[in-house]
Image (cartoon, rainbow, N blue to C red):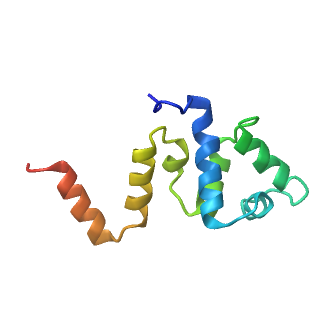
Amino acid sequence: MPEAGIAAGEVWPKRLKEARVALGLSQKQLGIESGLDEFVASTRINRYELGVHAPDFQMSMRLARVLQVPVAYLYCDSDDMAQLILAFHRASKAARKHAMAALQGPV
């Protein structure tokens, strides 16, 4: 269930824009680096960010790769969980192992 204030259809566009802005890419740069034709790149990314169009999963994976985020981040409907996904993705292997142990608790 999405957090209050985030409708299900707004999650993906919001996450896409957050990740793009955080990386300092223009819509056109993101589109081109994701494999879109340079003449449609800016418009297509703009439409994705506005929620007018939604990419298929393959395109989502290409965008996530360019944005250096796991594709799950783009679909996460909780801000806290999205930040946790990013932190885990960026953590070292040792830190991930430690986090998993802490989250799983005693066995």
Residue drawn 70% across and 65% down?
Answer: 25
Q: Residue 73: give x, y in percent of width and height.
A: 50, 49
Q: Which residue is drawn at the image coordinates 18% and 57% (left, top)?
A: 101
Residue 38: name its quadrant: bottom right
Left or right of 20: which side holds 3?
A: left
Place of residue 79 in the rendered image (x, y in percent of width and height, measured from the top left): 45, 44
Q: Nearer the viewer, residue 21 or 35?
A: 21
**Count of marks placed on residues:** 0
Q: Residue at x 65, y 55 (%)?
A: 63
On the image, the x and y values in percent for residue 96 come to 30, 63
**Quadrant of residue 94 in the image?**
bottom left
Q: Could you say where residue 8 lies in the image, as x and y percent from the top left?
A: 56, 30
Q: Outermost residue, front direction?
A: 5
Quadrant the N terminus occupies: top left
Q: Residue furthest left?
A: 107
Residue 30 relative to residue 107: left or right: right
Q: From what the image shows, is residue 13 above or below residue 29?
A: above
Query: For the point 85% across and 58% down, which residue is it?
Result: 37
Q: Left or right: where does residue 58 sit relative to residue 99?
A: right
Above/below status of 102 relative to 55: below
